[in-house]
Image (spheres, rainbow, N blue to C red):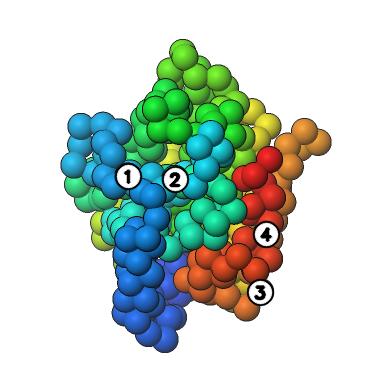
Amino acid sequence: MDLFRGMNAQQLEYQYELRSKEADFDAVVARWLKRSAALRDSRDVAIDLAYGSGDRDRLDLFRAAAGGPLLVYIHGGYWQRGDKDMYSFVAESFLDAGINVAMINYTLTPACRVGDIAPQVRRCMAWLWHNSVDLGFDRERLSVMGHSAGGHLTAMMMATDWPAFDPALPDDFIRSALPISGIFELEPLVHTSINAGPRMDVAEARRESPLFMEICGNASHLVIAGGAETPEFARQSDAYCDRFRTERRTMERYDVPGENHFGELERLAESTSEVFSRSLKLVDR
């Protein structure tokens, strides 16, 4: 039975279930955890700053340059797993380039609904903006980046009417957005094993899909995917760019050559890579 764009449940599972496509996923996780712990041990970082009262209302702030730009990184894990501690390594090349980096956590499903997470991340972004002087970064140069589910949350930040959320916030306080393999249309996940945590129905999935919202403002975007990912990830990123590109809003699209959903992050963490160079150009403006 066709469930989404002519695909059945088995085909959708193939498109979006990613761990089984990584030859040794456990080794990847172990490598990331080791690199991330080493970075935290060697850099100027404030661990577990509280941006709210919840158990996972926490972020790590890596300081590279007083008064410099801030890049906020939102981890993936299909809204049901993952932790900022695993992804610290992504910050290394940005820190070396003088970019401050905040790695944030958020509540995971099924302890909450997917629709509860974007408001939580909004509270985090607002907290960072309000506390920028004490935290030591330039709030006029704030960018947001997220991978996979974090790419979805990045897009949700760009679809936020910030003055309506907090009258003190300017509507364009996020200067640039860098979603990596983002999930911009959630409906196909409803029909896969990935939905074990989120437990979305089709109505909720459509309601939480930034592809069907409007971007507020004209922040520049770099929309990234892995060149070796399944076709659905390319489609999602292409659709997002096509939907929101305008004469005033730059929507650059880039595939990391030969990399899958996990390898693209390792290339991002390399200061000599093209994906890092393109990302730094957008963040360090």
- Across and down, in percent, residue 18 comes to 42, 73
To which residue does mark 1 refer?
46
> Rounded to the nearest whole Å, what is the CA distance between mark 1 and mark 4?
26 Å
- Foreground: 263 or 159? 263
Contact (Cβ within 8 Å) of mark 3 with mark 2 = no
Q: Quadrant of the C terminus?
A: top right
Q: Earlier in the sequence, mark 3 or mark 1?
A: 1
- 3D distance between C-alphas at marks 1 and 2: 8 Å
Asked if labels 2 and 1 touch by Cβ distance under 8 angstroms, the answer is: yes
Q: Choose the circle earlier in sequence order: 3 or 2.
A: 2
Residue 188 image position (x, y, % from top left): 45, 58
Residue 117 in the image, given as x and y percentages of width and height:
34, 40
Label number found at residue 277: 4
Helix, strand or loop at mark 2: loop
In front: label 1 or label 4: 1
Residue that mark 2 sits on: 63
Q: Quadrant of the N terminus?
A: bottom left
Instruction: Name the amino acid type tagged 3.
Output: Pro
